[in-house]
Image (spheres, rainbow, N blue to C red):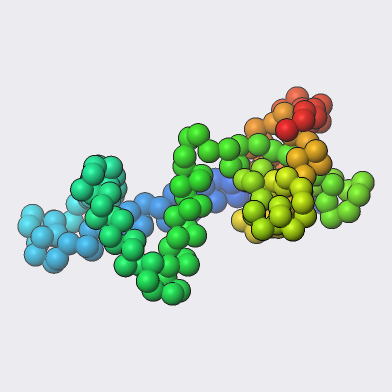
Amino acid sequence: MRLLRKYLIAGLLVWLPLAATVIVIKLLIELLNKTILLFPPELQPETLFGISIPGFGIIIGFLILILTGVFAANLFGRKLVGFWEAILGRIPLVRTIYSSVKQVLETLFTSNSESFRRVVLIEYPRKDIWSLGFQTNEALTAAKEASGRDLISVFVPTTPNPTSGFIIMLPAEDITQLDISVEDGFKFIISMGVIVPKGSSTDFSQKEV
């Protein structure tokens, strides 16, 4: 029975990660492929050429992203985007969602941003209990004024789902920077502490922020 269990677990370790990877890639490809639906029926490949071209929507989606980026990067495009965002900013619910998502994406994709560039260790939820977190930004000005201290915002994710978590604001002296990459930090959290960064636990050498 133990031997059967061993083989079953070994098989799961091979197929589950592969299946998860295939599913995610498949969803992304299907999403891009549906950009072909943006064209009117008379301009779609099946109408123009009489055949369905696999992957044509992916190419179109990629080109749309590139052309949108080129357009938004020039002066006229920036003004038009700014005008469009001003309109969205007048719609109560839409402006909250749009501005929040845009700010998060700008933070994550800006190469000179310090957000999510540091893995840190903090005492949370109480003293002598340590939690892994990611330094995001400076804390709210109102929080600094209320506390009378220079605070830093740290995102403490939950495990095994790191998309949810807690925002902790604490003094810089209470934050210890870890000598590990953000990728290794996420692996540690998603695996519920099973996957330790290469080089064993000694990689968690402490450095002041």
Vertical relation: 59 (above or below) 45: above
What residue is shown at x 25% (from left), y 52% (from top)? 79
Q: Is residue 38 left or right of residue 176?
A: left
Q: Is residue 4 among what the camera can see?
A: no
- Quadrant in the rendering for residue 143: bottom right
What residue is shown at x 47% (from left), y 66% (from top)? 97
Which residue occupies the extreme right position in the image? Answer: 128
What residue is shown at x 71% (from left), y 52% (from top)? 144
Nearer to us in this view, 69 or 199: 69
Vertical relation: 37 (above or below) 202: below
Nearer to us in this view, 14 or 152: 152
Q: Is residue 107 among what the camera can see?
A: yes
Q: Is residue 114 left or right of residue 173?
A: left
Q: Quadrant of the C terminus?
A: top right
The percent position of residue 53, horizontal first and vertical second, equals 19, 52
Which residue occupies the extreme bottom position in the image? Answer: 92
The percent position of residue 86, horizontal first and vertical second, equals 33, 63
Q: Is residue 155 left or right of residue 19?
A: right
What residue is shown at x 24% (from left), y 55% (from top)? 80
The percent position of residue 15, horizontal first and vertical second, equals 59, 47
- Total marks placed: 0
